[in-house]
Amino acid sequence: MTLQIEPVPCLRDNYAWLAHDKDEGVCFVVDPSEAEPVRRALAAHGLKLTHILNTHHHPDHVGGNLALKARFGASIIGPGKDAARIPGIDIGVTEGETCRVGSYEAKVLEIPAHTRGHIAFWFEKDGCVFTGDTLFAMGCGRLFEGDPPTMWSSLSKLMRLPDSTRVYCGHEYTEANGRFALTVEPGNPDLSARMVEVRRVRAEGQPTLPSTIGLEKKTNPFVRAQSGEIRSSLGLEAADDVEVFAETRRRKDAF
Ligand SMILES: [Zn+2]
């Protein structure tokens, strides 16, 4: 059993993720911003959509829900705690639940702060996680509906997944995130090396995703509150991790 996962570029810089296993008759999309690009990708592969997975309620993640459901009869799985804001939701899921998509299983992780009800889908056996707008490559989402301690705890939960876990997030923000990361941790050799690779990939117009949990631990300033260099860049040598995270997020908001 192998899940094929590919990005479907939507809107300006969103990715919906199309995942399928023809042998198992499984085909789902995560966070369809809009229906048409997803419909075209399905047609190109001769696939029929069975499920839609939503990480959170923002329009650029659920905008295609109703049209895709009407066309394919796909069932929509999303955050149970935010069911009222997920168009067309059929199944609301909460922390620790196992969400079944055909023969595939995802564990649901509640990771609030970008929105109150934000969740991730962790396909443990397949080694991948869909993180929406909470964890980005070298970045994290804005804190629209949660405070820094809440986001820190959400990111920490994701960092406890195995290092090899592939990370599929909602936007192509990697290069801009990396430019910011270099302002707070310019001496991190893993970060510099990653940016060389990211710039090369973007110059070819290719996606920089997926990332991995291990790579984020080495290069993402929002999960590196223990870094001495980040602490001294921020003038927070003795602060606790949440304060370092909060100041990093403030600086990025103003970047
Ligand atoms: Zn969002």
Image (cartoon, rainbow, N blue to C red):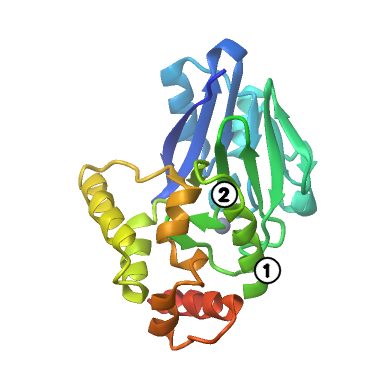
**Ligand 1 quadrant assignment:** bottom right
Disc 2 residue type (three-letter)? Thr
Res 113 quadrant in image:
bottom right
Nearer the N terminus, badge 1 or badge 2?
2
Q: Which mark is residue 35?
A: none
Q: Secondary structure at mark 2?
A: strand
Let me know if residue 12 appears in the view: yes
Q: Residues within 10 Å of mark 2 (few under 14, many from 20)?
A: many
Q: Is 203 in front, or is 82?
A: 203
Q: Which quadrant is home to the C terminus?
A: bottom left
Q: Is 135 in front, or is 224?
A: 224
Q: Residue at x 52, y 41 (%)?
A: 165
Q: Is 48 in front, or is 104?
A: 104
Residue 108: percent from left, percent from top: 71, 44
Residue 209: percent from left, percent from top: 40, 44
Callouts 1 and 2 close, C-beta under 8 Å: no
Tell me if the residue at label 2 has its CB under 8 Å from ligand 1: no
Question: How many numbered markers are drawn?
Answer: 2
Q: Which mark is residue 150?
A: 1
Q: Secondary structure at mark 1?
A: helix
Let me know if residue 63 appears in the view: no
Q: Which quadrant is home to the N terminus?
A: top right
Q: Residue at x 64, y 23 (%)?
A: 50
- The CA distance from mark 1 to mark 2 is 15 Å
**As drawn, 68 above or below 118:** above
Q: Which mark is residue 131?
A: 2
Res 30 quadrant in image:
top right
**As drawn, 71 above or below 13:** above
